[in-house]
Image (tube, rainbow, N blue to C red):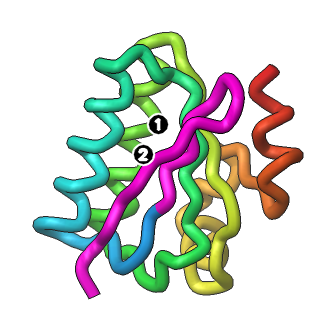
Amino acid sequence: MPLRATHRDAGQATVLDLSGKITLGEGSALLRTTVRKLLDDQRTRILLNLADVDYIDSSGIGELVSAYTTVKGRGGELKLLHLTKKVHDLLQLTKLFTVFEVYSDESTALNSFQ
């Protein structure tokens, strides 16, 4: 299933709801362009909701890291929400679990931006 992305405002943050696969090609390109568009709209507090992301390949991991560094470079924050077991295990395996702030509750995650 190709990646789909929608965003919604939630207080001072923007929640980016992703579903599908973040893989080489369209998936990682969609993530990249969506995050950059949010930054261009001055939305620098971004919460990536990964509840419906069932697969991330190495390109997708690279794109998550790229999004994180791009947002940080613009003075913002990017955090992760609702990791599936597969994605959670992958972030632990790649030692990226220590880089990202990860939440399992949306309201707690949104409150962390303030």
Which image quadrant: the C terminus? top right
Residues packed near mark 2 inside 10 Å, few (<14), some (14 to 19) or many (20 plus): some
Q: Is residue 14 magenta?
A: yes
**Residue 30 image point, x, y percent:** 22, 55
Looking at the rendered structure, the kind of residue marked 2 is Val
The residue where tag 1 is placed is: 68
The quarter in which the N terminus is drawn is bottom left
The residue positioned farthest toward the left in the image shown = 25
Report if residue 41 lies within the magenta region: no
- In the rendered structure, which segment of residues is drawn in magenta? 1-17
Magenta stretch prevailing secondary structure: strand
Up the image or down, 37 lies above or below 88; here it is above
Residue at which label 2 appears: 65
Left or right? Give the position of 4 relative to 89. left
Tell me, for residue 93, which label it has, or none.
Answer: none
- Where is residue 32 drawn, in percent x and y? 26, 45
> Up-down: is 4 above or below 97?
below
